Amino acid sequence: MSTKQKRTPRLVKRGETWHIDKWVRRLCESTGTTERGEAERYLARRLEELRQAQVYGIRPRRTFREAATIYLNDGTHKRGIADEAMHLKQLDPFIGALPIEGVHMGSLQPFITARRGQGVKSKTINLALGVVRRILNLASTEWLDENSLTWIESAPKIKLLPRTDARAPYPLSWDEQTRLFSELPAHLCVWRCLRSTLGLENRKFVNSGGTGRCRSRSLGPAFSSSQEGG
């Protein structure tokens, strides 16, 4: 006599993948699997997470990858979102699968070490760390779940790296200045030529009254960025 396999209610197969469709506060999401048994285990875990959150205020487990996805979807209007997406793609193999509360300077160290091994400067690594810091801050302050709990209780401190490997500034050669000025509009070229010749700061040039006239103690006479007298 055959026995029918007991089915977990509210698992619905859409195509090849099992989906949850259950009212708790309604839980409707993909399980990410095509196997019925695995889908049932996923449903049981999600229901227990919701119960823990509702009864005990225990936050459900969420991965950093989930947080990064929310961040990118919410930031499509931002000018620099493509660069942030690139940094998150590079971070994903290192911290994407970690629970979001498990992302901190310790778990970020393999990423930092790997990027340094690729010859990447601290400034670029800091840009990626800055994105992580913003996501963690949002998860601890603004992102609320259906139980009005933030995604994480508090955000760990993400410290930026000291920029000891930055390239030292150096004066341009005459050839480099010529190539630079050839790319500038005419009015900026005159201004840059004057500044580089006299060694003036922006504020000193601007404070000349907008006339373009500045005085150099070393050169004596007044110089003008206008084309007076040819």
Image: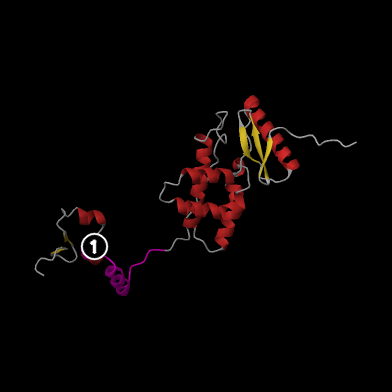
Give neighbour class at mark 1: few <14, some 14-19, many 20+ (Cα, 10 Å).
few
* Magenta residues (range): 168-187
**Towards the viewer: 66 or 17:** 17
**Towards the viewer: 114 or 12:** 12
Tell me which residue sits at (54%, 45%) in the image: 69
Tell me which residue sits at (53%, 38%) in the image: 139
Colour mode of the rendering? secondary structure
For this orientation, the residue located farthest to the top is 55
Residue 21: quadrant of the picture: top right
Q: Is residue 58 above or below residue 86?
A: above
Q: Is residue 159 visible?
A: no
Q: Is residue 158 left or right of residue 193?
A: right
Quadrant showing the N terminus: top right
Tell me which residue sits at (58%, 28%) in the image: 147
Q: Position of residue 78 (x, y in %)?
A: 42, 47
Q: Is residue 173 above or below residue 163?
A: below
**Towards the viewer: 158 or 183:** 183
For this orientation, the residue located farthest to the right is 1
Does dot 1 land on a helix, a strand or a loop? helix
Q: Position of residue 130 (x, y in %)?
A: 48, 48
For this orientation, the residue located farthest to the left is 229
Q: Is residue 28 magenta?
A: no
Q: Position of residue 180 (x, y in %)?
A: 30, 68
For this orientation, the residue located farthest to the bottom is 175
Q: Is residue 182 magenta?
A: yes
Q: Is residue 45 above or below residue 77?
A: above
Residue 183: quadrant of the picture: bottom left
**Towards the viewer: 194 or 133:** 133
Q: Amino acid at mark 1?
A: Leu
Residue 197: quadrant of the picture: bottom left
**Circle 1 is placed at which residue position?**
188
